[in-house]
Structures are given as C-alpha cells and as structure tokens.
Image (cartoon, rainbow, N blue to C red):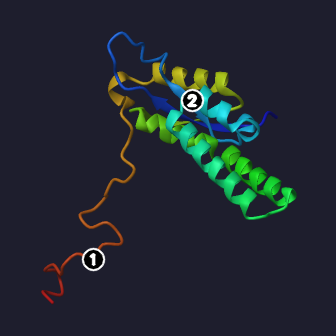
Amino acid sequence: MARQTSFTVHLAPAKPGRDADEAVQFVPDSFSLVAFLVPWGWFLWNRMWLTFVVYLVVMVAVFVALTYSGFPPSIRMAISFAISLLIGLEATNLRRRSLRWRGYREAGVVVAANREEAERRWFAEQDAAPRAARAPAPAFAATSAHPIGLFPEAEPGARGLR
C-alpha cells in the first residue's frame, strides 16, 4: 500500500485574467528533503523572499557567533545540521504561512499518495459539489443557546431564580 500524505489546499485570491483552478496550491504535510539539503534554494524556488533574507541573516549571525566564540568545527557543524534539520521539518509550514501572507485562503485537506492524486481528488470533489455548497463549514456551531464551557447567568426555571 502506498504511503498517504495529507495536502492542504490553498485557493488564490481572485485576480482578473487568472484561472482560479490553475492558481490552486497543494502543500504536503511532510519533511522536505530539498529544504533540508539546500534551504536557500528551496526558499527562492518557492518565492519566499522575506524568509530567504531572514535565513541568510540568521545563518551569518550564527556562523560569526560560533566562529568567534571558539567552538570546535565539530560543534559548529552539529549546530548547522540542527538548523538545517529544523528547516526541513518546518519548510511546509513556512510555505503555508507565505501563501497566507500573499492572500491565499486554506480551503481544505486532501489525503493522497502524491500531488497529482491530491489534485485529482480535490477537483473531482469540487466538480461533484454544487457551487453554493463550496463555502467551508464553520469550525464550531452551537447547538444550544449556551455551549458547554460557558456559564450563563441564572435563568428562571422549575426551581425559580437564584
């Protein structure tokens, strides 16, 4: 059985002349090997300019601090490895945040073996759903006047006012 990955689906903001289906972004929820090995290249490839600049500033500062503090090369290499590992683990979250900053809206999650299958599943479900029902459902819908966890003021009832 193929390994399944969840993909978050991000819809682009409406712009004249842009096909809405072509601008949909699918972001996997997985470790990014490319971001781990070549973080600067991954940031540039995904058009994450501000993140790239922050990465450069942080890496230069870490390099200078470790060099002038007298740490041996093995410790400097371990710290650089740890930073790269962190970037590989958080790369997709950074991409989601970058898309949100650019006006994209997260529309849902699709579980699939790869990106192509995720696209097929997403667009097949979108074609099957009526246009009016495409708005996302609210995360919480109260079923009573007083949801659990909130303490309403005393109301008159069978036992009277308190």
Residue at 73% in and 35% down? 38
Separation of disc 2 and disc 1 at Cα? 41 Å
Disc 1, SS: loop
Residue at 26% in and 67% down? 146
Q: Nearer the viewer, residue 50 or 30?
A: 50
Residue at 72% in and 37% down? 4
Residue at 60% in and 50% down? 58
- Picture layout, residue 51 above or below residue 82: above
Mark 2 in CB contact with mark 1 (< 8 angstroms): no
Q: How many marks?
A: 2
What residue occupies the far top of the structure in this picture? 17
Which quadrant holds the N terminus?
Answer: top right
Which comes before the other along the chain, label 2 or label 1? 2
Q: In the rendered image, which quarter is residue 37 located in?
A: top right
Q: In the rendered image, which quarter is residue 160 located in?
A: bottom left
Type of residue at label 1?
Phe
Local packing at callout 1 (Cα closer than 10 Å; few below 14, some 14-19, many 20+) is: few
Q: Nearer the viewer, residue 113 or 46?
A: 46
Q: Nearer the viewer, residue 65 or 95?
A: 65
Q: Position of residue 136 (x, y in %)?
A: 39, 38
Type of residue at label 2?
Phe
Q: Position of residue 87 (x, y in %)?
A: 67, 46
Q: Position of residue 22 (x, y in %)?
A: 49, 16
Q: Position of residue 32 (x, y in %)?
A: 71, 38
Q: Which residue is mark 1?
A: 151
Q: Which residue is mark 2?
A: 26
Which quadrant holds the C terminus?
Answer: bottom left
In this picture, residue 159 sits left or right of residue 127: left
- Picture layout, residue 73 above or below residue 7: below
Residue 141, numbered label: none
Disc 2, SS: strand
